[in-house]
Image (cartoon, rainbow, N blue to C red):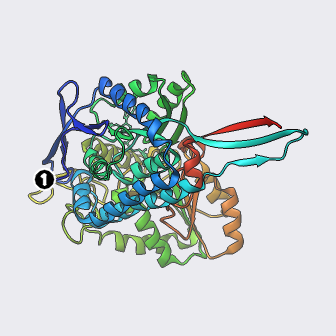
């Protein structure tokens, strides 16, 4: 247990118990041990937090972008300086290996740094008038109170990717982090608290009843923006519910990323690329390779090389040195992954390695799944259509570029897609043809704070990161002046 285990909600600059007095428990997915008890926010707490955020708008939105940027930059510095303790905390609640947790802290801080500066560049426009004696201009203003709902797979970076642009734009925030990973969210709030950010600018209300909290946020007219990262299923519900009050909404939803390898690729680079894409966070990332598409000519050799490396990945508690594969987040996650694998096998697919959960032992007591490569997969299998969210890689072969494109786009998702090739013309053709919001060409880790992250089709609406990210929290106001 660390100092960063507050048991209380963060509302209006104070640490308070839930209005109901209820708490819920947070467990370490690597060993099932209790990590913390956390105040369990109610709808009433959500309303109180929204009121606080609304009241804080009059102070926060009036600060200059430079003043707001100071808080963001300082929070980023504090994150970096506390990387060791925060990474341990993150690993304890999420399970990812410590090295990945450290990487996530750095990544999370980068959003704070980027938007600390980007807030200063929210320029207006002067538009040449089509009639004499009029001045036309556009001013950008903060939307107001933004409610952020975030997932457990990146317990801190998915938060800074939202709150950094929101705060930079002059919005105030009510944050509902995932119930499996509220401790990193609290740690971040504590940093802002220690920086004396004005009361109510940032509020944090984890809850074991997410639908109730969402309902309170959606039904409250003071909330003008919903920003959600999570499953497509929940995202669609929120989207529909936003219609009532015509709230602005950003959705970062699930993916089903194809990872396509052509015969002209650097195969060693592609093998390493697919490993880093697929097995990071034990395959529980929205942009991770969900389907490996191999050209027929290189498929056999590629699978041999890949299997050799995958078999060397070390499974274990993320706090131990040298571990590559941590646990899945919970029993449900592990069962879902295994059901997809067993379904594929029952329909004719074959596991080259892995293919089942890790048997519990004295040292491994959590929800671990063996890294799995599964061949002879066909597009009619459930594993092809669903986001696996585990360390399982289904493989399909193709003969032509057209066939690869057809397979790749054969999904309702459109978040990220990957192509490995050394052929420049093919790079342009594939970039044009793939229906994805993010495309990594010979690059398995395209996410970065300065570029727009987000999906097309059913993977979402809006973008996070880059100059696009701050627009999600701004309203354009057009002003016409007779002169
Ligand atoms: P999830 O079940 O949709 O949960 C995400 C958040 O929504 C959590 O805070 C959760 O609270 C809350 N929630 C759950 N049910 C809700 C409801 N009925 N109404 C309102 N909020 C509700 O998703 P997850 O399993 O945590 O996260 C994995 C998903 O997130 C995957 O599909 C992944 O692809 C996606 N994701 C997308 C991106 C992206 O940028 N596109 C990034 C990361 C993850 P509780 O924790 O209390 O359940």
**Image check: 183 left or right of 401?**
left
Residue 149's spot in the image, x, y percent?
40, 39
Does residue 280 appear in this view?
A: no
Residue 282's spot in the image, x, y percent?
33, 58
Q: Ligand 1: give its quadrant.
A: top left
Vertical order, 185 against 249 (above or below): below
- Which sits in the foreground, 89 or 292? 89
Ligand 1 is within 8 Å of the C-beta of the residue at disc 1: no
Residue found at the very far right of the displayed protein:
132
Instruction: Identify the residue under disc 1.
Output: 1
Residue found at the very far left of the displayed protein:
362
- Which sits in the foreground, 203 or 214? 203
Residue 150 sits in quarter = top left
Q: How many marks?
A: 1
Circle 1 residues within 10 Å: few <14, some 14–19, many ≥20: few
Q: Quadrant of the C terminus?
A: top right
Q: Residue at x 51, y 50 (%)?
A: 64
Q: Secondary structure at mark 1?
A: loop
**Image check: 402 left or right of 232?**
right
Q: Residue at x 23, y 51 (%)?
A: 93
Residue 406's spot in the image, x, y percent?
64, 53
Residue 127's spot in the image, x, y percent?
79, 46
Q: Residue at x 20, y 32 (%)?
A: 17
Does residue 272 appear in this view?
A: yes
């Amino acid at each position: 247990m660390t100092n960063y285990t507050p048991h209380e909600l963060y509302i209006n600059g104070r640490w308070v118990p839930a209005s109901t007095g209820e708490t819920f428990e947070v467990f370490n997915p690597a060993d099932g041990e209790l990590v913390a008890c956390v105040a369990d926010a109610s709808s009433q707490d959500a309303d109180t937090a929204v009121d606080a955020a609304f009241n804080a708008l009059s102070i926060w939105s009036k600060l200059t972008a430079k003043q707001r940027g100071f808080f963001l930059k300082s929070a980023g510095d504090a994150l970096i300086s506390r990387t060791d303790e925060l990474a341990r905390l993150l690993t304890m609640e999420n399970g990812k290996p410590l090295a990945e947790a450290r990487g996530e802290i750095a990544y999370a801080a980068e959003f704070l740094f980027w938007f600390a500066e980007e807030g200063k560049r929210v320029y207006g426009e002067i538009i040449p008038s089509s009639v004499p004696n009029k001045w036309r201009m556009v001013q950008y203003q903060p939307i107001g109170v933004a409610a952020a709902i975030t997932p457990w797979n990146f317990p801190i970076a998915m938060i800074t990717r939202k709150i950094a642009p929101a705060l930079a734009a002059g919005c105030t925030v009510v944050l509902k982090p995932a119930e499996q990973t509220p401790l990193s969210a609290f740690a971040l709030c504590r940093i802002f608290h220690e920086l004396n950010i004005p009361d109510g600018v940032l509020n944090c209300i984890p809850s074991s009843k997410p639908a109730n909290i969402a309902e309170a946020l959606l039904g409250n007219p003071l909330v003008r923006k919903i920003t959600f990262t999570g499953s497509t299923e929940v995202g669609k519900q929120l989207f529909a519910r936003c219609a009532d009050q015509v709230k602005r909404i950003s959705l970062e939803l699930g993916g089903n990323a194809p990872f396509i390898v052509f015969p002209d690729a650097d195969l060693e680079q592609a093998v390493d690329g697919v490993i880093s894409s697929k097995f990071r966070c034990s395959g529980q990332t929205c942009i991770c390779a969900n389907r490996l598409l191999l050209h027929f000519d290189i498929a056999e050799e590629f699978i041999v090389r890949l299997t050799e490396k995958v078999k060397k990945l070390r499974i274990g508690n993320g706090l131990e040195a040298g571990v590559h594969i941590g646990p899945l987040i919970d029993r449900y996650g592990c069962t879902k992954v295994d059901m997809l694998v067993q379904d594929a096998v029952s329909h004719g697919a074959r596991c080259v390695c892995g293919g089942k959960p890790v048997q519990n032992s004295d040292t491994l007591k959590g929800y671990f799944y063996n890294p799995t490569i599964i061949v002879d997969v066909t597009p009619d299998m459930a594993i092809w259509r669903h986001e696996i969210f585990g360390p399982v890689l289904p493989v399909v072969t193709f003969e032509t570029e057209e066939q690869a494109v057809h397979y790749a786009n054969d999904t309702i998702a459109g978040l990220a897609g990957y192509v490995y090739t050394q052929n420049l013309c093919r790079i342009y053709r594939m970039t044009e043809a793939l229906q994805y919001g993010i495309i990594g060409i010979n690059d398995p880790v395209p996410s970065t704070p300065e570029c727009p992250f987000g999906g097309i089709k059913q993977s979402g609406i809006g973008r996070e990161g880059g100059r696009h990210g701050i627009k999600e929290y701004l309203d354009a106001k057009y002003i016409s002046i007779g002169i």
